[in-house]
Image: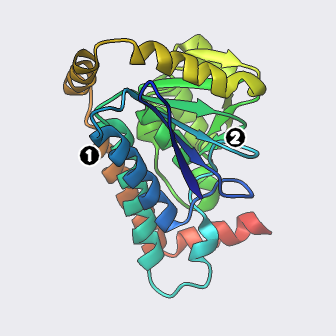
Amino acid sequence: MINVERHDNGVVEVTVDHPPVNALPVQGWFDLADHVTAAGRDLTTTAVIVRAEGKGFNAGVDIKEFQDEVGFQKLVGANRGCFAAFAAVYECPVPVIAAVQGFCLGGGIGIAGNSDIVIASDDARFGLPEVDRGALGAATHMSRLVPLHKARAMVYTASWATAQELHEFGSVLHVVPREELRAKALEVAGTIAEKDPTVIRMAKESLAAIDLWDVHKSYRLEQSYTFELNLLGVADKVREDFGK
């Protein structure tokens, strides 16, 4: 499901490969968090690349796990797993590069929005279709990728933004053909790897210290609204209607 490759210059690739659409089950989110955390804890790591194989970067939570479940154990697990994965990216002591291809939805937005650098293929599309799934969340991270009113419109309409749009906003560093995505991510990571590692780690820490808002508290608050929708039974109805 998740593969890790370490390069000689200290760059670590964490690759999600969970067909058909890289929608991760609960344990997958915790595994992703563990791999990113382990990579950052290793003092020989210079940068981390989070990327994916297959059709797209990430389709969020695997909602099939919620089907026919009595109670909310899987929902709580998904909430906590996503929180852990997004936090691991944000708190990683070295820069994290998200290499985004194809679709980047829901949880994918959380990963990209908490990354230090986003590089995208020219077919990449970013979206939060949560309202069509009876859920909320990751607006915290979408608001780090697009301007405020664009983010609000995307939440309300479950619409997409292209890689080219995000490049114009300044949140995507490079847009390249899909076949060049991994090479470009490795190139940028390699440039970082050439810098003094202590300075880079201190730079990452300082940038987090001056961030304009607390992404952890903000996202946790969003999750509480998703839980309320499930308690009210609205989430199940919306998911059923969407599947028809």
Q: Residue at x 60, y 36 (%)?
A: 154
In the image, residue 153 lies at what x, y percent? 58, 33
Q: How many marks?
A: 2
Is 216 situated above or below 244? above
Left or right: where 177 falls relative to 134: right
Q: Which image quarter: residue 194? A: top left
Taking depth in this image into account, of 123 and 194 the one nearest to the observer is 194
Taking depth in this image into account, of 127 and 225 the one nearest to the observer is 127
User: In the structure shown, which secondary structural element does the residue marked by tag 2 occupy?
Assistant: strand
Q: Which residue is mark 2?
A: 103
Amino acid beneath label 2: Phe
In the image, residue 101 lies at what x, y percent? 69, 34
Q: Which residue is mark 1?
A: 217
Q: Quadrant of the N terminus?
A: bottom right
Q: Residue reaching furthest bottom? A: 70
In the image, residue 110 lies at what x, y percent? 47, 42
Q: Residue at x 35, y 60 (%)?
A: 224
